[in-house]
């Protein structure tokens, strides 16, 4: 049984809910490489996927956990009531996360990683040097439109991306949650990163911010449930529509080039970047 400092849990949707499984597989391979790039090896990773899913070859320290959950019938935003879509996505994702967590009762911390995101190579090393806290949240992170030379420096990253929380295992109490009976708990504590942070604050276990850019959120992915397309649309246009010109210009200043330092730190696979 694992006794690593951190277990990363990667929930992978049902293959019948994927628009392009080959892209999911390719993105997951890049996420795996990003985790492998950690400076400290005091971690392991479980990938929770449906039986029959074609996963990439898993290197040492990665384990596939197979489940038989049914496809999410309310996955597509444009075909169903939005609240129902969000509710079912939280339940489906939360059940996968819970399944992974239950396999690692001895890990000190747990971190959910979405299957197309990237981690800063110093993340585990930082936790190792500061262990003992309830956990951490990543408020500073990058938003990267896939294949582009630009990215966005986001200072409210934990409000945007699920790859943003490192939490002490005992606070989740995964062994006490019934995967069939505790649907509300699964949706609130596991299925939504926003609700998890609120819940911990309410019970008196606040998290600390990671003092550097801790993760990278990939957008422009046809499989992404958020359907986010580009950083200008996400971060600049809303201010322009609301005639908040100062805020729009400020948002533009957070658009940076994807350089070699960031590529190395996050193990980003971007053939188009040649910047130093």
Image (cartoon, helix red, strand yellow):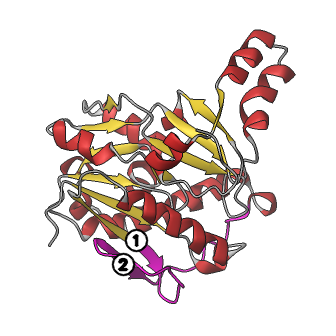
Seen at 80% across and 58% down, the residue is: 78
* Contact between labelled residues 1 and 2, with CB atoms less than 8 Å apart: yes
Find residue 67 and report its image quarter.
bottom left
Is residue 185 rendered to the left or right of residue 43?
right
Residue 165 among those drawn in magenta? no
Seen at 78% across and 21% down, the residue is: 239
- Evaluate whether residue 192 shows in this view: no
Which is more toward the observer, 182 or 156?
156
Which region is colored magenta? 47-76
The residue under label 1 is 47
Residue 66 among those drawn in magenta? yes
The residue under label 2 is 65
Residue 48 percent location from the top left of the image: 42, 73
Which is more toward the observer, 182 or 63?
63
Relative to 276, say whether 31 is above or below: below
Which is more toward the observer, 26 or 240?
26
Q: Secondary structure at mark 1?
A: strand
Ranked by sequence position, the earlier of labels 2 and 1 is 1
Relative to 231, say whether 181 is above or below: below
Q: Secondary structure at mark 2?
A: strand
Q: Which mark is residue 55?
A: none
In what quadrant of the picture does the N terminus appear? bottom left
Seen at 73% across and 23% down, the residue is: 252
């Amino acid at each position: 049984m694992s006794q690593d400092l951190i277990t990363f849990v990667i929930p992978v949707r049902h293959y019948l809910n994927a628009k392009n499984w080959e892209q999911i597989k390719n993105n997951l391979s890049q996420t795996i490489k990003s985790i492998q790039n950690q400076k400290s090896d005091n971690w392991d990773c479980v990938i929770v996927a449906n039986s029959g899913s074609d996963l990439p070859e898993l290197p040492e320290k990665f384990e596939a956990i197979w489940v038989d959950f049914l496809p999410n019938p309310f996955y597509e935003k444009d075909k169903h009531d939005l609240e129902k879509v969000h509710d079912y996505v939280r339940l489906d994702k939360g059940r996968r996360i819970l399944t992974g967590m239950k396999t690692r009762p001895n890990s000190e911390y747990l971190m959910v990683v979405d299957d197309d995101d990237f981690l800063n190579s110093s993340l585990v090393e930082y936790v190792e040097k500061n262990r003992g806290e309830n956990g951490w949240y990543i408020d500073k992170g990058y938003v990267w439109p896939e294949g582009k030379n630009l990215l966005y420096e986001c200072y409210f990253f934990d409000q945007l991306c699920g790859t943003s929380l490192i939490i002490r295992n005992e606070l989740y109490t995964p062994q006490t949650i019934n995967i069939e009976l505790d649907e509300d708990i699964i949706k609130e504590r596991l299925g939504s990163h926003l609700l998890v942070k609120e819940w911990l604050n309410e019970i008196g276990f606040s998290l600390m911010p990671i003092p550097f850019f801790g993760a990278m959120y990939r957008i422009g992915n046809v499989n992404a449930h958020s359907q986010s397309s580009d950083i200008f649309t996400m971060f600049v246009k809303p201010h322009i529509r609301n005639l908040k010109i100062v805020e729009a210009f400020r948002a533009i200043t957070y658009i940076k080039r994807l350089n070699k330092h960031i590529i190395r730190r996050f193990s980003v696979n971007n053939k188009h970047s040649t910047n130093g």
